[in-house]
């Protein structure tokens, strides 16, 4: 097998930021997998999850930790507490990156942070848009309305008026920025009576 230098490898893949072993095999089918282990040990690469890696320089790129979320487990989009915090809808900062996916529920941990993915039905995989990073990459992100519905759907413990109040959703955002037409349009697509009941309770608390 040909000996592939790290410099040649880096020159080829640095533009991707993060990449999969299958991408590397397409480039060079004689690539030896033990290079990944050795380069990670030498701090030249960061292992994100099985079959996915990134360059350590990416730790300094703003929003790269969020970008990874949609790359290492697909299809998925950022939602739930991470999206609600991003929009300023909840006061808490969120340490882990929360996403939803049509694949099984799973979590990963790497040098960029903690990643959790909640499973939803394929019919509910909608209501997200691509947000541009400063370097031009795109991150699939739930709209505020879909992030809120995903939360109420996947966390059914939120059901009473007291529960909704404890979410501490920003009242200015709820009254001025939340798109209620979109919220109720999305709600119909869920076709879930329990979720409708929770949204009615939410509406009473926040005056929607």
Image (cartoon, helix red, strand yellow):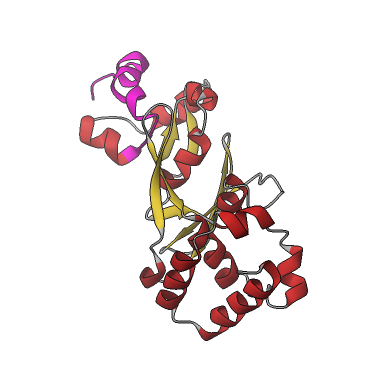
- Left or right: residue 75 versus residue 24 is right
Residue at point 68%, 57% (across, down): 171
Look at the picture and state if 53 lies above or below 107: above
Look at the picture and state if 70 lies above or below 127: above
The quadrant where residue 50 appears: top left
Look at the picture and state if 194 lies above or below 57: below
The quadrant where residue 86 appears: top right
Residue farthest toward the bottom in the current orientation of the protein: 193
Residue 176 inside the magenta-drawn segment: no
Residue at point 50%, 66% (across, down): 180
Q: How many marks?
A: 0
Residue at point 50%, 25% (across, down): 61
Residue 111 on image: x %, y %: 58, 34
- Left or right: residue 178 versus residue 26 is right
The answer to whether one can see residue 49 in this image is no
- Left or right: residue 59 versus residue 24 is right
- Left or right: residue 101 versus residue 155 is left
From the viewer's side, name the closer residue of 193 and 202. Answer: 202
On the rendered image, what quadrant is the N terminus found in? top left
Residue 11 inside the magenta-drawn segment: yes
From the viewer's side, name the closer residue of 10 and 136. Answer: 136
The answer to whether one can see residue 25 in this image is yes
Looking at the rendering, the stretch of residues picked out in magenta corresponds to 1-21
From the viewer's side, name the closer residue of 129 and 52. Answer: 129
On the rendered image, what quadrant is the C terminus found in? bottom right
Look at the picture and state if 11 lies above or below 114: above
Residue 115 on image: x %, y %: 56, 48
Residue 167 on image: x %, y %: 71, 62
Residue 3 on image: x %, y %: 28, 19
């Amino acid at each position: 097998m040909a000996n592939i230098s790290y410099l040649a490898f880096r020159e080829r893949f640095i533009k991707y930021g993060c990449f999969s072993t299958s991408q590397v095999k397409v480039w060079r089918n004689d690539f030896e997998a033990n290079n990944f282990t050795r380069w990670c040990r030498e701090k030249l690469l960061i292992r994100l999850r099985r079959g996915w890696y990134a360059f350590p320089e990416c730790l300094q790129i703003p929003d790269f930790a969020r970008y990874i979320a949609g790359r290492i487990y697909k299809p998925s989009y950022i939602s739930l507490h991470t999206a609600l915090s991003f929009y300023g809808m909840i006061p808490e900062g969120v340490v882990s990156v929360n996403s939803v996916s049509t694949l099984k529920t799973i979590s990963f941990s790497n040098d960029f942070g903690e990643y959790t993915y909640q499973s939803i039905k394929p019919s509910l995989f909608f209501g997200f848009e691509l947000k541009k990073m400063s370097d031009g990459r795109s991150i699939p992100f739930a709209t505020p309305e879909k992030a809120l519905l995903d939360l109420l759907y996947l966390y059914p413990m939120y059901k009473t008026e007291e529960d909704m109040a404890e979410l501490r959703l920003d009242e200015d955002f709820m009254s001025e920025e939340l798109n209620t037409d979109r919220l109720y349009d999305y709600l119909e697509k869920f076709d879930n009576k329990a979720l409708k009941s929770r949204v009615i309770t939410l509406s009473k608390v926040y005056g929607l």
